[in-house]
Amino acid sequence: MDPAAPLIFFDSGVGGLSVLGPTRALLPNAPIVYAADSSGFPYGKRSEAELATRVPALLGRLVERFRPRLAVIACNTASTIALDHARAALDIPVVGTVPAIKPAAEISKSRVIGVLGTEATVRQPYVDNLAARFAADCTVIRHGSPELVELAEAKLAGQEIPVEAVKAAIAPMIDQPHGDEMDVMVLACTHFPLLADEITAAFPNIVQVDGGPGIARRIAYLTQGQPWPVSPPGGIAIFTAAHRAPLASSLARFGLDDIREL
Ligand code: DGL
């Protein structure tokens, strides 16, 4: 294994940074390529058929170009729809991001949990299966919020996000039957942990759970024993459409100092 072989993180936008963050904490010397399909954003509005072909095709181009050791689909929408297609198309390990329903059900006392994702994710049979397997004795309330995805992008572009806007985006979930009993919320879109502080301010009594730290541990496990560069290398961020310059300082905070277009 070439020590310079990177890990690729893939999302529609900046959401995958919530998976990259905990991964960098565990593997500080890992070379990173962060790919954002900004010309396909937002994925939550796209059809299953479209994503099932688009995601493996883009990953294929990225793998050819960067020869990574492993790819992370750091997006719940893309993973719940296209993970199997991507694994079939690529000859490297592909780690997906799927809603953390199991850990949420393990800690819920009220037995009412929420799954907050994109509109595309919350309608997936993948979510039905996770709920049936791991939360059969819970009421599972689902809500798709394109507004929160936009708010997360805006926050990383340097805008101040009013707690009221976050509260309004989540309110339809609380208004569903038993919504007021919900004690744990699965952040089933990688954009949403980027708004963790605002969500806590809006709903201080609801515990948030997301997949980022678990995925980081999985990546560390899958790359155990592999060589890395001796010091932390710079990271690449690559966009499928002209990226918005205001993101540069947020990307730099995640070690991504080389910004390119695919
Ligand atoms: N970050 C993505 C997810 O985890 C999708 C956001 C979007 O493009 O709609 O689902």
Image (cartoon, rainbow, N blue to C red):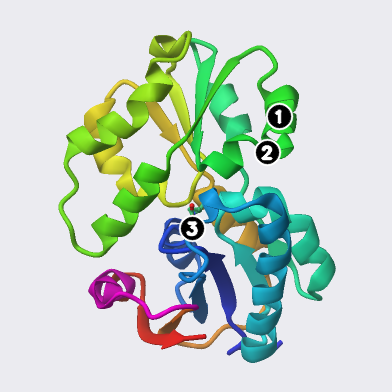
The residue labelled by disc 2 is: 124
Is 150 left, or right, of 230 in this rendering? left
| Residue 4: image tag | none
Residue 67 image offset from top left, x and y in percent: 67, 87
Is 232 left, or right, of 158 in this rendering? right
| Residue 162 to residue 228: above or below | above
The residue labelled by disc 3 is: 19
Q: What's the magenta region?
A: 240-251
Mark 3 Cα-neighbour bin, 10 Å: few <14, some 14–19, many ≥20:
many
**In the image, what residue type sits under mark 2?**
Gln
**In the image, what residue type sits under mark 1?**
Asp
- Marks 1,2: beta carbons within 8 A: yes
| Residue 91 to residue 207: above or below | below
User: Dividing the picture into quarters, in which one does residue 244 lie?
Assistant: bottom left
Is 128 left, or right, of 204 in this rendering? right
The residue labelled by disc 1 is: 128
Q: Earlier in the sequence, mark 1 or mark 3?
A: 3
Q: Secondary structure at mark 1?
A: helix
| Residue 51 to residue 113: above or below | below
Residue 242 image offset from top left, x and y in percent: 38, 81
Query: Which residue is drawn at the image coordinates 55% and 59% (left, top)?
Result: 74
Disc 1 from disc 2: Cα separation: 7 Å
Query: Which residue is drawn at the image coordinates 38% and 11% (left, top)?
Result: 180
Mark 1 Cα-neighbour bin, 10 Å: few <14, some 14–19, many ≥20:
few
Query: Which residue is drawn at the image coordinates 35% and 70% (left, top)?
Result: 254
**In the image, what residue type sits under mark 3?**
Val
- Marks 3,2: beta carbons within 8 A: no
Disc 3 from disc 2: Cα separation: 21 Å
Q: Is residue 233 visible?
A: no
